[in-house]
Image (cartoon, coloured by chain):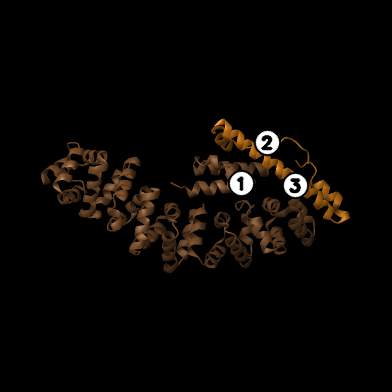
Amino acid sequence: MTRDDDRLPLDSRTQAVIDGLPPDEREHLQILMKKAARHQRTMLEKALDEAVGMVPAPLRKRVQKLFLGSS
Amino acid sequence: MRNPAIQAELVKLARVLQTEISELEHLDYLEAERLRTLREGITEALFEKFRSTFTGFARLSSMLPLAISARISERVLGPTLSGRIAGEMPPEKAIDLAARLSDSFLADTCLHIDPVRAKPIIAGFPVDRAIAITRLLLERGEMITMGRFVDVLPQQTLFAATDAIEDESDLLKIGFFVENSAQLDRVIEHLDTRRREAIVTAAAAEGLWPEVIATLLRIGQTSRLAMAELAMAQEAAILDSLIRAATEDDLWPALLQIADEMPSSVIGTLAHEPAFAEAAVVRSVIDSVIANDLWTRFRNQTPSMGATRLARVLEVAADERKPFLWELDRRLHEGDSDLAALREASAQLPPATRARAHNACANGLLAATLAADA
């Protein structure tokens, strides 16, 4: 997994709702969304490390290939 | 007016964002539909952003023996990630894996599953296991999560789960969060009269009328009329609680809509209750009619209210809501079905009240009626 920014790829309907919020509310929601994305990324990175460690050794290389290119 | 639909959406959004509901309470002025768009969009984006990793974990579970996959789920992924990965797994594999996981872990995982994405898994999930998880979610008060699952449950599981929920107020609370109205219709058809009556009693006892009325408006007409008829046949204390809830939470638009569909008169039945004569109740009806432009629906109901209660409406309006009389007078035409009822009610008013009511009118038929009686 590479650590790119934590912006979420929102669809146009969701973006329209967010754009319609007052600036301070929009900013607060954007902070919460980034926090959620960051939290999920951290959980997935940690889970991946631990999961690979639990996989039987002969399968580890194949498992690592499964996650190549993961965000 | 409290709006449980908005509250429910905020709870669901807080869960998606892994935050406290207090962080989102400033959004409580948004309509439930907009909050739902927000919640669904953010859910999808959080999934889409990490799709390849979720898919990787889903494929990993296909490569490994079930025992190891189950260990990874419970010890490493936890309920949040397991819930998000579940929808990416082949349904048979997910069901086999679930057989190795504890009820408690699966109940936790349900909070994070998107039931729509996981529908093929839910369709093939063993009924007895589903009931065990239903009971756990019920113990934990997870009505919102249960409501989301009802949307996609196959009929056999839906009915078994309904039977497993013994307290009708729980059924009511869950039903409020169900979005698929066809599933609600199925549940109502499945319930016998005793359980339907218990739902009405629970609504009165626990102050859940706004939830009941909101749910009634979303279900099919046959189920709605059956439940409404049943409610109207209940004892005075229950009808009294409905009147007070309608006054407090402005349920009159919904009640008038339901009343318009029913062969018997909802408003007529409620009007015979003593509470309907209270000035605060009458004011709330009048205010709702004016604010929501419910003139046609209200006037359809006036003949069944009885002359005494209609006279009370005229009296309260003459004292405190004069614009109501002016507008009613302006709208009345010869041959209207409520004209005779208004004449009968007018005849019951004391002369001084009649004079006040007359003074509030335009120069229409109501004014003429009030003048003739004077």
What's the chain of the residue with tag 2? A
- Mark 3 belongs to which amino acid? Leu
- Kindly report the distance in space between the C-alpha atoms of the residues bearing marks 1 and 3: 21 Å
What's the chain of the residue with tag 1? B
| Left or right for B317, reference B146 | left
Q: Mark 1 points at which residue?
A: B20
- The answer to whether mark 2 and mark 3 are in CB contact below 8 A is no
Do badges 1 and 3 share one subunit? Answer: no
Q: Is residue B190 shown above or below A28?
A: below
Q: In which quarter of the image is residue B64?
A: bottom right
State which chain is coloured orange. Answer: A
Q: Name the residue under label 3.
A: A44
* Percent of width and height locating residue A45: 77, 45
Q: Chain B is drawn in which colour?
A: brown
| Left or right for B92, reference B164 | right
- The answer to whether mark 1 and mark 3 are in CB contact below 8 A is no
* Percent of width and height locating residue B163: 52, 67
Helix, strand or loop at disc 3? helix
Q: Quadrant of residue B286?
A: top left
| Left or right for B202, reference B96 | left
Do badges 2 and 3 share one subunit? Answer: yes
